[in-house]
Every structure is written in C-alpha cells, then in structure tokens.
Amino acid sequence: MPRTAAPLLFALLLASWSAPMEAVATEAAVPVEASPVPAFDEDDPSRAVFDGLRFLGGIEVDSSDDRFGGLSGIEISGDGRKALLVGDNGDLFSATLDYDDGILAGLSDVAAYRLIGADGKPLGDKESSDAESLRALGGNGLAEGSVSGDFLIGFERDNRILQVRVDDKGAPVTAKRLALPDAVAALPENKGLEGIAVIPPGAPNGGAIVTFAESIVTEEPDVIPGWMIRNGEIRDLGLKRTSDFNLTDIVALPGGDLIVLERYFSIFSGVAMRLRRIPAAALDGPQPMEAATLLTAGSAHEVDNMEGVAVHTDAQGRTVLTIISDDNFNLLQRTLILQFELL
C-alpha cells in the first residue's frame, strides 16, 4: 500500500472500527507467522542509530486466530526470551521471543487466555475488557524462563487496575482490584489509564506504582495526569504534553528513570511514535514533570500504532526496549515488535 494513502485509510478504519465479536476459538494455542523488519528507516536502511537509541531489529506478526491483535501492553523476561502481552479485547498472551544471532527473528509458543475479574469470572464486553497496560508487580519484568507471577493490568473505559496472578502457562488464576483515587474513575471513557510502571527495588521510590492517563483530561493545559502509589499513599503527578503526542505506555529503568512511549496521529501526516525519558528524581520534584526526547519517528519509519514498551538487560549488558503496536484488529494496520538499545 502506498504510504501516501496510509494516513487516510488508517483514519477511516479507526473511525469505523468496533471491537471484534468474541472469537470462536477456545484452545490456548495461537498460530502466528513472523516476518523480519530489518531496517527502521525506510529512506536509509543502513542507518541504525536514532538519537538516543540504536535499532536492533524487529518483526511483523500475523495470525489467523481472531483473538490475536490489539496488543497494548508487554512484559519481558530478564533474558529477553519470554513475553507476556495483553490485548485491548481482554485476552492475555504468553509467548517466546526467538532470536537469530542476537537479533529478534520470530515469535513462538503463543497461547491466549481470557482475563478474569475480581469475581474470578472471564471479562465480558469491551467496557470491562479494554486492557491498555501490563507490568510485573516486582518491577523487574518476568523471571527468566517463566511467565508466572503477579502483574498489574490497567484498563480504560472502566478505569481500574487489576492485580492478576498468572500461572506458568500464562493463564490468569486470581485477580483483585487496586484502590485508586476518585479522579481515576472519573477519567473520560477513551482517555483513561494508559500506562503503568513499577519502580524496581533499590531505585529511588523503589516498589512504587506509577500510572498515567492517555492525554489531557483536566482544565490544566498541556498536562497529562498521573499518580504514584507507594506504601499505601497516593500522590498526584503530572507530565508536560508537547506536540500533540498522547501517552500510550511507561516503563521504569533499573535506576528508576521512566521511559514514556507516545503516539501522534494526523489524517495528513499519518501516525508517529515518540520516546521520552523522565529522571527518577523528577518524581519527587515540582509537578508537572519535563521529559527529554529520545526518539521521534513517523511515516518514513517502521511504525504503526505503538502502544506498549518493556525493558530488559541482555547478555551483552545492553538496556533493550521492546515496543509493540496495536493493530486495532484492522487489516491495514500491523502488529510490530521492535527492539532498540538505549544508548
């Protein structure tokens, strides 16, 4: 498809999209096919360094299973091999990331499980199942070789965070609702909780949960509202919004800095992605916070509706960001998984 036509088609599909009907498939296994994304810059395929990041590689993933798509949150194991992903239709996916000489080359062992609510029952309609973020509760990602553990899953529409226990297959076992400020429940239906970070132990504010809404939702201009939950206390945060980008996810680095993933869309210029970095100390400073831009990428780059980001440290000691896109279950959008080294 010509890139010049993509913005209009993307807009039309977003305008007309509605959540897919509940999939007929009930088996956990999900067949997928992955093709490589060898270059990030289409105009200069040999280019690897983009401001504060180095492109390591990526894949585009397709599936014949109706459940696979709408991916909006991701968590990665310390060795970069195991992944847990959440879709905004209420499904949780476990998977293995495959590498060829250290470069992301495929996705295998994919299985899907329906999220459950605090009552233990599978989530129902879009209002209750619009999951937008996923983070391991301990702040250190998945344990190596495993997808089990306790996770925080953020939802918009019915704005809430569930703490979900997942077994070694990736299936939810129990769930409970976290206490949040009244301001969270009052967020607009489709501009609700969009990102969750858990500060790693040993970093400033270690163990704290940080969550942000998608965009401006108050009378305060150009400020994205957020909250930090630590030791039972909840504190208001704010992030300065610039250039009409909306927040889609956040993740904490080992030292406590936050990486912010953002998206911009225009019918004229198409979709763009931006990554910014918030210093750990800013969480305890004056609000709203500033964030330094690491990367801005648009129509000349391999991006789509980038919604989720995770971090791990690879065998070479590199800090690796893994970013996924939400295809909105639209045929003309893509599910991308991209990896960058943080320089």
Image (cartoon, rainbow, N blue to C red):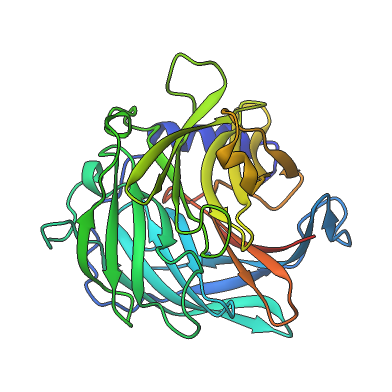
Residue 209: x and y in percent read 43, 51
Residue 275: x and y in percent read 67, 46
Residue visible at 40% across and 32% down in the picture: 191
Residue visible at 80% across and 60% down in the picture: 343
Q: Relative to 339, does residue 4 appear above or below in the rendering?
A: above
Q: Is residue 159 visible?
A: yes
Q: Is residue 69 visible?
A: no
Q: Quadrant of residue 221?
A: top right
Residue visible at 35% across and 43% down in the picture: 233
Return the residue nearer the eye: 77 or 255. 255
Q: Is residue 154 left or right of residue 205?
A: left
Return the residue nearer the eye: 149 or 48. 149
Return the residue nearer the eye: 331 or 329. 329
Return the residue nearer the eye: 88 or 242. 242
Number of numbered discs visible in the structure rendering? 0
Residue 152: x and y in percent read 35, 58
Residue 227: x and y in percent read 43, 38
Residue visible at 85% across and 59% down in the picture: 45
Q: Relative to 25, does residue 128 appear above or below in the rendering?
A: above
Q: Is residue 75 left or right of residue 174?
A: right
Q: Quadrant of residue 182?
A: top left
